[in-house]
Amino acid sequence: MTNTQNYTPILVGVAQNEQRITDWQDHKEPLDLMFDALQAAAQDCGNPKILDAATAIRVVKGRWPYTNPAAVLRDRLGVPGAETAISQYGGNYVQTVVNQSAVDIASGKQHVVLITGAECGYTQAKAQKAGAKLRWEALGGEPDRVYGEDIPMSHPEELKCQIGAPIQLYPMFENALSHAMGETHDAHMKSVAELWASFSAVAANNPHAWMRKPASADEIRNASATNRPVSYPYPKFMNSNNSVDQGAALIMCSTETAKSMGIPEDRWVYLHAGTDAHDTYYVSNRDNLHSSPAIRHAGNRCLELAGVSASELDHVDLYSCFPVAVQVAARELGLTHRSPLTVTGGLTFAGGPLNNYVMHSIATMAELSRAEPASRNLVTANGGFLTKHAFGVYSATPPEQPFRHEDLQDAVDAEPTRELHEGFAGTATTESFTVMYDGEGPASGHVAALTDDGKRVWASTADRDQAAAMVGADLIDTPVRIADRVASF
C-alpha cells in the first residue's frame, strides 16, 4: 500500500568538530570524527535516543579508503536495519543528500536520517611530511545506495593540455569574469581581496573555523612568505584550505517523529525548498567562462519555491572554494551588493574539508535559524569546476507550503553551449588564461581561446619566460598562436 501522507521534513540535530594535533600519530581518523559528530548532533536535538531510531545513514565521500563508512557507523550505533549510503565526489553532495533525504522523509520512505562526513587533511599533511603512511582500512563493503554518478569532468583535449585541476580552471574563470565586468585587473583583484577579507572577518567569530586570525585585504592580495602565488591571479589565501581535520553531522526527521520523540520545537529547522542542476560536465562546452546557467536556474527556482526573494534573505552562505565561485553565484542570484556572503568564513578560513564543507555551513545556518526563528536563509553548494550545484532554503519558521524539490536540468540543458575544436592549429582569440607557479616562480601557462567560427580551443606553454610575461598582461581578446597545443603570444 502506497503512503500518500505528506510529512514535513526538518533538521533537528547538528554538530561540528575539529582536531588540532601536534603529532600525526595522535589523531582520530575520519570515521571517528563522524561518529563523534553524530553523537554530538543527537545531544543537540535534545534526545540522544534518536540515534536508536535511525532508518538511514548517509555519508559524503571523502579522501579516505572506506568503501561504506555508513555500515561501520551503523554497527557502532547498533541500528542494524538502517539503510547505508555514500555520495560521489563533489562539494554539491551535502546539499543534494539533504534535499533527497527531505524528499524521502516527506514521502514517508525514511523516518530518521543521519548525515555525516569528515576529513583529516591536516593529519594527512603531517604524516606525509614525516614520510609516514596512515593505516586507515577500507571498511564497510558495498552501500545500499550511492548518490550521484561518477562522470568525468575533464575533456581529453583539456588533459592533453595538462589542464584538469581546480587550481587551473577557477583562476581562468576569475580572469574571464574580470574581463566580462569591464574591470582592470588591479581594480578587480582589489575588490576580490576585500570580498575575501569579509569572509576572514566572519571566520574570526566562528568557533569552528580553522583560521580565526583576521586577514586584511592587503594580506590576502599580496604575495608573502605565508601567502605564496599559486595560480594567477590567486595566491594561497584565495584557495580552499584542505589541510584541516573537521567533521560534521546532521540529523533529519519529520515533525511527526520529532513530536513523538519529545524533541523541543526550538530545535526544529525547516528545509523550505531544495533544487539541483549541473552545468556542462566539460568546461570545453560552456558558452562562456564567467557565468553559470545552473546556478541561475536552480538557485533562483529554489528561492521561488521557498517564496522568498534574494533581497529578503537574512543569511546566505555561497560556496567559496575560490573567489570566482562566490562572485558568479552572487551575480546569478542577485546578491552582488550583499555582505557578508558567508556564515562560516568559507573554505579558505573556516576550512575546506574537501566535499564536506557544506555540512558545516548547514550546521551553522541551523544555529542561526534557531537564534532568529523568522529568518529565511540560503545555502549553496558547488562541485567540480563550477559544475554541479545544489541549493536549500532554511528557516525555523514552518513553510507556508509543503517542502518542494525540483531538478532544473532541462532548463539548463536548453541554454547555449559551445563546440570544441580539438587539435586546433593557427591563430585564435584569447578567452582567458592562467599561470601556474612553482617554488621558483611562474612555471607554465594555460590558455582558453576562441576560433573565428566561435569554437573553443585549449593550449599551454611550459616556457618559463612566456609564463612570466603572461602575469599581469592584458591578454584577453588578443591573438594567440597555437601549434601542437602550445600557446605563444
Image (tube, rainbow, N blue to C red):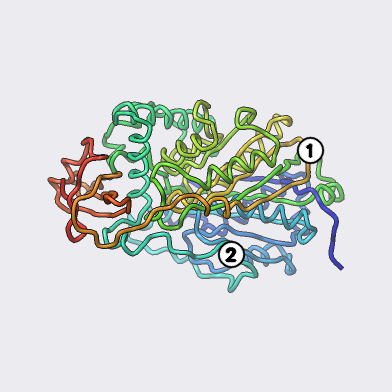
Q: Residue at horizontal 30%, vertical 37%? A: 226
Q: Position of residue 218 (x, y in %)?
A: 33, 26
Q: Earlier in the sequence, mark 2 or mark 1?
A: 2
Front tag of 2 and 1: 1
Q: Residue at horizontal 38%, vertical 42%? A: 239
Q: Residue at horizontal 67%, vertical 56%? A: 100
- Say above or below: 286 vs 269: below
**What numbered label is drawn on residue 182?**
none
- Say above or below: 380 vs 144: above
Q: From the image, which quarter does the N terminus lie in?
A: bottom right
Q: Residue at horizontal 47%, vertical 32%? A: 199
Amino acid type of disc 2? Pro
Residue annotated with mark 1: 400
Q: Position of residue 365 (x, y in %)?
A: 63, 38
Q: Secondary structure at mark 2?
A: helix
The answer to which of 40 and 62 lies nearer the viewer is: 62
The 10 Å Cα crowd at callout 1, few under 14, some 14 to 19, many 20 or more, is: few
Residue annotated with mark 2: 69
Q: Position of residue 89 (x, y in %)?
A: 50, 59
Q: Position of residue 212 (x, y in %)?
A: 47, 33
Q: Is residue 3 left or right of residue 325?
A: right
Q: Is residue 444 left or right of residue 258?
A: left
Label 2 to label 1: alpha-carbon separation: 37 Å
- Number of labels in the image equals 2
User: In the displayed image of the protein, which residue is found farthest to the left?
Assistant: 465
Amino acid type of disc 1? Glu
The answer to which of 434 and 212 lies nearer the viewer is: 434
Q: Is residue 332 left or right of residue 165?
A: right
The answer to which of 357 and 455 lies nearer the viewer is: 455
Q: Are marks 2 and 1 in contact (CB under 8 Å)?
A: no
Q: From the image, which quarter does the C terminus lie in?
A: top left
